[in-house]
Image (spheres, rainbow, N blue to C red):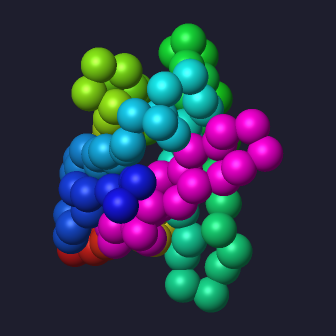
Amino acid sequence: VQLQASGGGLVQPEGSLRLSCAASGSIFSGNVMGWYRQAPGKQRELVAYITSGGSTNYDAPVKGRFTISRDNAKNTMYLQMNSLKPEDTAVYYCNALAGTLSYWGQGTLVTVSS
């Protein structure tokens, strides 16, 4: 397995979760890493990405609530999600972009509900 996402679960609105994505070194090092999500009946969308140098970018709905980070020594990427809303409910996927190659993890389900 080259990308392994974990950390999803059921959380109440306004709660927090931290997702992790463990990657093999060959596809993590030096590449852009990102989190995507796909809600039921919707297309997969980019949530956030982080470059090898640590520059980040967020989709508007999560800006200010989510924080993407990476630990290059551990080949692991994180997504800290705070102030979660029901509309954040989705399967979250991690992605590695290595040139023209795109790698995907298996997804982890996040459910925000009271």
Q: Which image quadrant for residue 55?
A: top right
Question: Where residue 108 sits in the image (x, y, percent)?
Answer: 34, 67
Above or below, 23 against 89 in this view is above
Q: Which image quadrant for residue 36?
A: bottom right
> Is residue 86 a member of the stretch shown in magenta?
no
User: In this rendering, does residue 66 appear at all?
Assistant: yes
Residue at 32% x, 35% y: name it. 76
Question: Where residue 16 sits in the image (x, y, percent)?
Answer: 24, 47
Residue at 34% x, 31% y: name it. 75
Quarter in which the C terminus is drawn: bottom left
> Is residue 94 a member of the stretch shown in magenta?
yes
Above or below, 26 against 55 in this view is below
* Extreme residue in the right direction: 100
Relative to 112, 52 lies left or right: right
Above or below, 67 against 92 in this view is above
Relative to 43, 35 lies left or right: left
* Extreme residue in the front direction: 26
Quarter in which the N terminus is drawn: bottom left
Q: Report the predominant secondary structure element of the magenta stretch.
A: strand
Q: How many marks?
A: 0
Q: Nearer the viewer, residue 1 or 33?
A: 1
Above or below, 32 against 109 in this view is above
Q: Which image quadrant for residue 78?
A: top left
Q: Nearer the viewer, residue 22 or 107?
A: 22
Residue at 41% x, 54% y: name it. 2
User: In this rendering, does residue 48 appear at all?
Assistant: no
Question: Where residue 31 sits in the image (x, y, percent)?
Answer: 59, 30
Read off the magenta span. 91-110
Residue at 26% x, 57% y: name it. 6
